[in-house]
Image: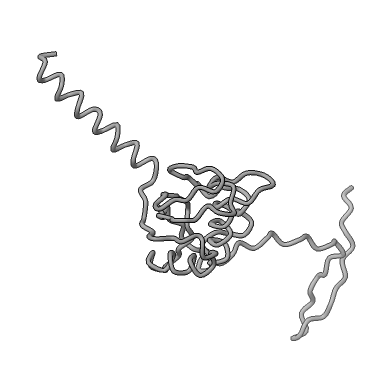
Amino acid sequence: PSVAAPAATVAAEGGSALAVSDAKPTAAPAAEPPRESRKAKRKVAMIVAYSGAGYHGLQRNPNVRAVEDELVEAAAAAGFVAPALVADLQALWWCRCARTDKGVHALSNVISFMCALGEEPIEVVAARMNAELPDAIRVLAVRRSQTLRLSRVRLLAARADTTVKSRQNTGF
């Protein structure tokens, strides 16, 4: 014989009866943020200039202050990076074109990352980041960047085209 959970009957408005279970309510699944509140992420490349005085180079290192620390924190403060991702550059697809040593200055280093732009124009990125950065570091320009996959596809296509042309010229 099966045993049913005890239920109480409650009179509802209008005279019909409703069964109320004694079972504990289950936790509702975590609600996903509304689609409107999530910003579209775009790969951007920014040209930065900085005075390295007071920094231990561009690249982030434990227990020392680096220019990258300032840039990532400024991006988070400006709303272009989730605060939870500030410690994880890999999750941001953060990529730098070069590094500098302690105290070295740079006039135009390029850094790319996934930027939560949403519907905002890309022109606002530099101004909002510069408002959060110390005077020794400036974002000079920001442009949309192609994804790595697209770049690889174009590189392979260019390589294949070059190979075909060289084989036609040599008779192979």
Relative to 53, residue 167 above or below = above
Query: From where the camera sits, is residue 27 visible?
Result: yes
- In the picture, measured across the screen, residue 1 lies left or right of residue 15, that is right
Q: Position of residue 114 (x, y in %)?
A: 47, 53
Figure coloring: one colour
Q: Count every numbered label the image shows and give the total.
A: 0
Corner quadrant of residue 140: bottom left
Relative to 96, residue 170 above or below = above
Position of the C terminus by quadrant: top left
Corner quadrant of residue 164: top left
- In the picture, measured across the screen, residue 155 lies left or right of residue 105, that is left
- 23, 152: nearer the viewer: 152
- 38, 133: nearer the viewer: 133
Residue at left offset 47%, top offset 51%: 105
- In the picture, measured across the screen, residue 85 lies left or right of residue 47, that is right
Q: Position of residue 55 (x, y in %)?
A: 58, 51
- 19, 123: nearer the viewer: 123
- In the picture, measured across the screen, residue 28 lies left or right of residue 125, that is right
Relative to 152, residue 55 above or below = below
- 72, 30: nearer the viewer: 72
Residue at left offset 45%, top offset 65%: 118
Residue at left offset 57%, top offset 57%: 70
Query: From where the camera sits, is residue 90 visible?
Result: no
Q: Position of residue 48 (x, y in %)?
A: 43, 55
Residue at left offset 72%, top offset 62%: 28
Residue located farthest toward the top when viewing the structure as drawn: 172
Corner quadrant of residue 102: top right
Q: Position of residue 159 (x, y in %)?
A: 25, 29
